[in-house]
Image: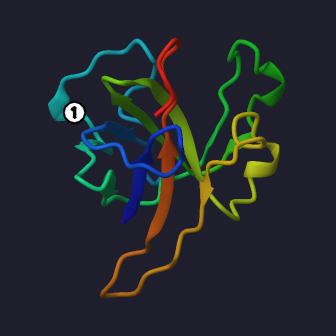
Amino acid sequence: MLTGTVLRPDCKTPVVGATIDFWHCDHAGAYDIKTPDEKIAPENYRFRAMAQTDASGRFMFETIVPGRYGIPPGLEGFEQFAGQTRPAHFHLTVTHPIYLPLTTQVYIKGDPFIAKDPWAMHSKLAFTLRKGSATAPSTGSFDVVLANRPGQRRS
């Protein structure tokens, strides 16, 4: 169970009605699409969800811990990382009409593959996953801060 709050640029005030587009790979590291330009029908989507923040700017997703996978050979600009294992991570795009859209990846603290991953190694977007039990899910929480659009007054 992943929860969090979308915040305004002041890092304090919640954003009501932000849309979170959330996706990740399966337990074996496979995504529902193989290339970024591949088109599949919504009924073939796997491990994808969308939600809107509530009156407190909160969101929640119930899902699995994604698997890890190797960086593919021939990825332009990242050839030196080919075959290296990506840490478990979640993708999200957060949009709201007033703020700049944000697309990012969120990682699980303690994943040993973060230190060498070209995307994760400098990221501050890692959360603690608290292990669950037979009757309660594992839980994690993180906040997202949106930026003002250029020329917009600070909120």
Q: How many marks?
A: 1
From the viewer's perspective, is 142 left or right of 42? right
Q: Is residue 103 above or below residue 145?
A: above
Viewer-proximal residue, 152 or 72? 152
Residue 62 location (% of width, % of height): 30, 60
From the viewer's perspective, is 134 left or right of 114? left
Residue 10 location (% of width, % of height): 53, 43
Residue 97 location (% of width, % of height): 30, 23
Q: Residues within 10 Å of mark 1 (few under 14, many from 20)?
A: few
Q: Is residue 118 above or below residue 14?
A: above
Q: Is residue 65 visible?
A: yes
Viewer-proximal residue, 144 or 99? 99
Residue 147 location (% of width, % of height): 52, 29
Q: Is residue 16 above or below residue 77?
A: below
Residue 99 sits in quarter: top left
Residue type marked 1: Asn
* SS category of the residue bearing label 1: helix
| Residue labelled with disc 1 | 44
Q: Is residue 29 visible?
A: no
The quadrant of the rendering that contains the N terminus is bottom left
Q: How is the image coloured?
A: rainbow
From the viewer's perspective, is 70 left or right of 140? right
Residue at 28% across, 44% down: 16
Residue at 24% across, 40% down: 17
Residue at 74% across, 52% down: 113
Viewer-proximal residue, 83 or 101? 101
Residue at 35% across, 87% down: 134
